[in-house]
Amino acid sequence: MELISQVLVLEPTSQVLGKEPIVPFAILLLVILVIPIMFERLRLPGLVGLVFSGLVLGPSGWNLFQSDSPVINLLSDIGLIYLLFVAGLEVDLEQFRLRKSRAFGFASLTFTIPLLMGTLVGLILGYGWDTSILIGSLFASYTLLAYPIISRLGVVNNEAVRVTLGATIFTDVGAVLILAICVAVAHAGAFSFAKLLTLSGWLIIYSVAVVTGFDWAGKEFFKRSGDDEGNKFLFVLLSVFLAAVGAQLIGIERIVGAFLAGLAVNEAVGEGPVKEKVVFIGSVLFIPIFFVDLGLVINLPAFVNNLDTLKLTLLMLVGLIVTKLMAAFLAKLVYRYKWQEMLTMWSLSLPQVGTTLATTLVGYRAGLLPLEVLHSVIVLMLVTSTLGPLITSRIAVGLNSSPVEDPTLPLPDQNAAETDSAFTVVVPVYNPQTQQYLIEMAALLARQSQGKIIPLAIAPAAAHMDAPQLEASLQRSERLLTKATAQSQLLGVPAESVLRIDDAFAQGISRAAREQKASLIVMGWGKRTGLRARLFGNVIDGILWASHCPVAVTRLVESPKKIQRILVPVENLTAPTLQPVQFAQILAEANQSHITVLNVCDRRTSSSKIAWRRSHLSLMVSKLVLANTPEVQIIAHENVAQAILQAARLYDLVVLPFTRNRTSPGGLAISDVTTQLTRQLTCSIVMLGEPQRTQTTNVVMSHTISSITSAV
């Protein structure tokens, strides 16, 4: 009996859970979900919260996780590779091409000066040349954490900002190559120039092979894959890990291969759903786990009790801030920038996150960097990732943008035929409950320009064209189209219904709109919640990426014919963002409605700058040649979304631009004002999306505005 009782005794719950690899993974998912949100509400970067979580859960805290755990090590290694790959993928090659000579000049300054200072700091503290040079390279690169801020402020087109954006390609490549050489030389044993030349030769051959070979293979594969996003996604992932394996085979760090793979497939992937999915998986899962693992490595008692670590941290922090300021100041002298532009360049080049943390961890694992350097770099990351965006948000307010192309300018003669075509509104019909308001909206828009409506129904294709489910779908679609056509005729607008069989809704709608030479697509609200919707996108996402014309995504709480007051928030004071104003004008002319164009600036903006913004926005609106000039309002407020929500209480409709977040190379998304507004606004909403801006799109909309103005 005693033996049986011993056998029946269960193991303690903690021991059972400790043997299950799924348990630490579940805890990591909980941390990734909750902690960044909490820290962002405290006005701190989410990645700071992830590192702090690793510190609390690791040996210096509750000791729940160990840095040598196989599960965490595997996920962290994938995150490390993904981090450098995303850094290469997010390099803005277009910004580099626009100002490549000045970008190279600023990159040389902001790379060389911090590199020399960091190397000097390492030598002063008694480290060897390899370690000192590697410390210097940690100073050289920077992460564009403040990109969403300058985008929201509408100063991306400023030349100094463009130069800073373009310079990242040189600083990141330089830092990664220095890491590769330092680690390879350390592994090779005794240093010799012959070994260095051999390694450099292999590195050059490998880099050229990856960048040119993967670029060619990516473009060819994407060209032949058509709309199969799954295969494109797998090709990108395969490229990353093949490049990483190739780097290890020639004796250099795998993150070098990952970064070069990101550069190689940069143009092939472009700005599209494939890139969004690739970045999404890394930013949601693997990269945050890397930051948590980074916190596990921290030895808090050793950091606090070691005066040498505190001295090193202070030297690195002061050295970085001073040298980045020196580089920006020299760029100001050479290129004759203003003080405000110089300080903006300095603040943008301060944050040390993506490439810096990756190279630090690799150097630490390779034995080149001691633990105190790792501790100092983590503190450096925490300080600069908070300080840099904070300074940018204060300094870049009111920074003048470079002139941009006016969207109302005419095109060359080869596009005259398309410009003269009738205004055609395609309305996909699927939900009978929202169909009536959609047709009314399309009718109001088409009537003003003597255009027509094309109700469109998509029947999902089946393996056999006589399948019962396809027949049922066709009958349902025909009923919806008949109802839509009858409603259009009652509203006095010609309608030509189209029924299409296609494999996917998004591709079917985009293709049909192109075939019908649509000027605008008007569609209802779709679900954007749930993991599947975020990971694989939905119909709206697919149409926005593929459509050749503007897409108006609507959430109408009442009949469009009752809309009398329209609010158009404008974030950036640049001409392309005024397309929502043009759209609102078409609707306003139909209902004799009043339009208010609203811009929210920082509450610390001076009265003179507010007056400048008001006159600048009024001038831009006046260039649209509108029949009734909209009212222009400038509001100074600390929270853009809250200011718009307060103003929207007096309006029937809010027209918003559909914009996506640009994730930083750290992979952590920053909250979007548009997303917050769509969740809290109670009035009708139209989100106007222009995923692939072309001159033709602008001319079609401008031609419509001109025809309406002439008719009125």
Image (cartoon, grey):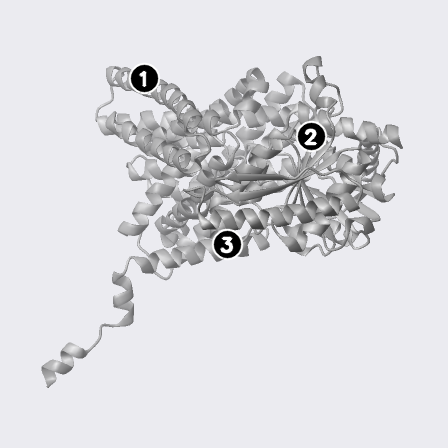
Frontmost residue, 385 versus 410: 410
Cα distance between the residues tagged 2 and 3: 43 Å
Q: Earlier in the sequence, mark 2 or mark 3?
A: 2
Rate crowding at label 1 as few (under 14), some (14 to 19) or many (20 or more) other CA atoms within 10 Å. Answer: few
The amino acid type, in three-letter code, at marker 2 is Gln
Q: Earlier in the sequence, mark 3 or mark 1?
A: 1
Image point (70%, 24%), residue name:
402
Q: Measured from the top left, where is residue 671 in percent x and y?
A: 59, 47
The amino acid type, in three-letter code, at marker 1 is Ile
Q: Is residue 322 left or right of residue 209?
A: right
Residue under circle 2? 340
Please tell me whether residue 559 is drawn above or below residue 588 in the rendered image: below
Kindly indicate whether the residue at mark 1 contacts the one at mark 3 (C-beta within 8 angstroms). Answer: no
Depth-wise, is mark 2 or mark 3 nearer the camera? Answer: 3
Residue under circle 1? 205
Rate crowding at label 2 as few (under 14), some (14 to 19) or many (20 or more) other CA atoms within 10 Å. Answer: some
Residue under circle 3? 530
Res. 661 image quadrant = top right
The amino acid type, in three-letter code, at marker 3 is Gly
Q: Is residue 235 left or right of residue 270?
A: left
